[in-house]
Amino acid sequence: MNRTVLIVVGLSVPLLAVTRICGADPLAISNAAVLAGSALADGKGVATINEAAGDGNVQANSDAVTNGSHAEIGISQRLSGRVGGGATSSARIAGDAFARFSGILNVNQAAGSDNLEANSVTITRSVHRLSLDQLMRIASPIDQVNGAHVTTSPKGARHVTVADNALTGVTGIAQVSQTAGSGNSLSNSVTLNISAGIRP
């Protein structure tokens, strides 16, 4: 019998996601998403993090471990409508965040509006090694359609940064989607087959 195991872990980590309307000008909006300090430094296991500052952002993480050659999970994301693109946006991973983490790490961080972000990991165990064709069928599909229309020119500054010490020494699988702005689509997908090593 083939079985699929879904792993979802919710963790409390130091983070900051703020949208501010600056000064007397109601159009002067500032979005800031920050993961800082020692967030999940030296952590172990499976960690999934979604952080967003702004409006209409869609984020998802999916991890599955399966026996055999079948995994039935997937991510489908849809956005439509109109969004302004003039905000100042900053997405930052700072300090020692995630340093020396061991396991599966999925991070989505967005500052802005109407962004799609997704990470997926599928690990399958089988007696025989699987071909590339079989792995592609097992892979968790990420289906993204971003129909958001940015109605204004991007006047505000946009910054995406990862500090030198952040994410250092990570072992295992690490997927990070990080965006500042509006109407972006980002995705990461990893499929891994662990076989008994029997040659065909």
Image (cartoon, rainbow, N blue to C red):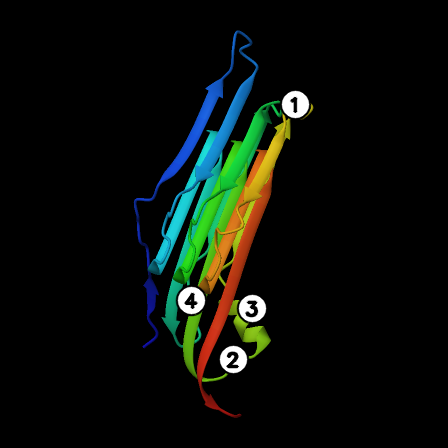
Q: Which image quarter: residue 181?
A: top right
Label 2, on which residue? 130
Quick check: 91 left or right of 127? right
Which type of secondary structure does the marked residue at label 2 adopt? loop
Q: Residues within 10 Å of mark 4 (few under 14, many from 20)?
A: many
Q: Answer with mark 1 or mark 4, whichever residue precedes in sequence.
A: 4
Q: Nearer the viewer, residue 174 or 187?
A: 174
Q: Nearer the viewer, residue 189 or 91?
A: 91
Label 3, on which residue? 136
Amino acid type of the residue that numbered disc 3 sits on in the rendered structure: Met
Q: Residues within 10 Å of mark 1 (few under 14, many from 20)?
A: few
Q: CA distance from mark 3 to mark 1?
A: 37 Å
Amino acid type of the residue that numbered disc 4 sits on in the rendered structure: Ala
Label 1, on which residue? 151
Q: Position of residue 172 (x, y in %)?
A: 44, 66
Amino acid type of the residue that numbered disc 2 sits on in the rendered structure: Leu
Q: Answer with mark 3 or mark 1, whichever residue precedes in sequence.
A: 3
Residue visible at 50% across and 83% down? 129
Q: Position of residue 93 (x, y in %)?
A: 49, 44
Q: Answer with mark 3 or mark 2, whichever residue precedes in sequence.
A: 2
Q: Is residue 129 above or below residue 117?
A: below
Res 71 label? 4
Q: Position of residue 102 (x, y in %)?
A: 39, 63
